[in-house]
Image: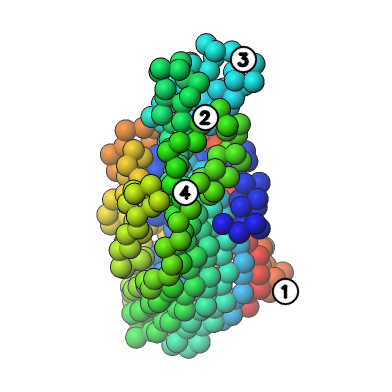
Amino acid sequence: MTKFTRPLLTASLLGLSLNATALPFATYEARSAGMGTTGVASSNIASAPFTNPAMLAAQRFEDDFSLTAGLGVQAIDNENLLDDIEDFSDAYDANDAAGMDAAASRANGKRLDVLGNGALNVGFSAEKWAGAVSANRYIQANSGVRYDAATNGLDSEIDLVGLEVTEVGVSLARQFGRLSIGVTPKSQSVTSYDSDSVLLRTIDDLGDLIDAATEEGEKDHGGSVNADIGLVYKLGEESRWQVGVVMRNISEQTYTTSGNRTVKIEPQTRAGLAYNGDIITVAVDYDLQENDPLVAGSDKTQMLAAGLEVDAFNTLKLRAGYIKNTADVTGPDDDLLSAGLGVNILGLQVDAAVMGNDNNLSGFVQMGVQF
């Protein structure tokens, strides 16, 4: 990870955590996050390259150019592992052997997943053709604690696996009557991180954990080629309803880490239904398959997402969403809520969103020009 990206991600994630159970079909921009991660049949010109490239050609609005840049962070804390890590750190600093043993024992087997990204997109939409050039750099990391009973928790270790991916894609979409088809060929440069011997006593907080996850056992896997492909169909010539489907990463990529573990970038398929009105947009998306976590130990996900956007005079946009994991999970399966805000003044667009539950939050922000 670059010297710029790591401290930015660390600072963004401190205090932000999303209490779910595994990494879902990821969202990479603020509008989608504010609307509950929906977008397969409802994304706009700024978000379409990351949600469904076919939506570039299925725009009903007058927007025909967009230049945006954004950041997003998600920390998925399974059963409050961060609290156990902080309790262990406090006990270690106080030389409290019983406290260390209790905290390490509670943390045993728990896992924490992190996803952070920075994205850039330039998109255009014409009468039938549309396109975009996009770049996205994201890191997905998983950590778990292994309790050492022989030392009463003192030599307990954290198991870390991470995958850092840089994608550069060119999207092309075309309208064929009521049907729009889009594809995004993209390059993927991949680096993995792997260590099963980071001592728990060397970690004080989430910042230390992220640094360890992006420094230990680094292995460069070079570049590969992949693609996203999507369809959108309008339900009637004058209808505001449309359905869509997208497959992200159509070619499965498998990597072996420095610790000889296998991690994958797997195909993900999602369908969506949306009403795109002048003032109100309503969307529902659903994963058509269960998505595996980065490593064994975390739960699978199959997300049902719903979102709403209210557009006031094409200037102020209020968003809300709901997300539920419908897969069988072993840990907490709290439903998630999201909220977002978009402001457009003379073509300058700023979007922000938060997503989580009563105790935890994730955050997204982006800005650019759109007209």
Tell which tag, 4 or 3, sits nearer the viewer: 4
| Residue farthest right in this picture | 346
What label sits on residue 163 in the rendered view?
none
* Residue position for label 4: 217
Task: Find the distance from the CA under tag 4 to the CA under tag 1.
Answer: 48 Å
As drawn, is 370 to the left or to the right of 74? right
In the rendered structure, find residue 346 and report the number of the disc placed on it.
Answer: 1
For the residues carrying marks 4 and 2, which lies nearer the camera in this image?
Answer: 4
Q: Of callouts 3 and 2, which one flags the residue occurring earlier in the amino acid sequence? A: 3
The residue that mark 2 highlights is 200
Q: Please state which amino acid type lies under the numbered disc 4.
A: Gly
**Dot 4 and dot 3 residues touching (CB under 8 Å):** no
Q: Which type of secondary structure does the marked residue at label 3 adopt?
A: loop
* Quadrant (top left, top right, bottom left, bottom right) of the N terminus: bottom right
Q: Give the amino acid at mark 1.
A: Leu
Identity of the residue furthest to the top in this view: 98
Residue 209: % across, % down: 55, 39
Q: Secondary structure at mark 2?
A: helix
Q: Amino acid at mark 2?
A: Leu
Q: Residues within 10 Å of mark 1 (few under 14, many from 20)?
A: few
Would residue 140 be seen by someone viewing this image from the given angle?
A: no
Question: Label 4 vs label 3: CA separation?
Answer: 30 Å
* Label at residue 95: 3
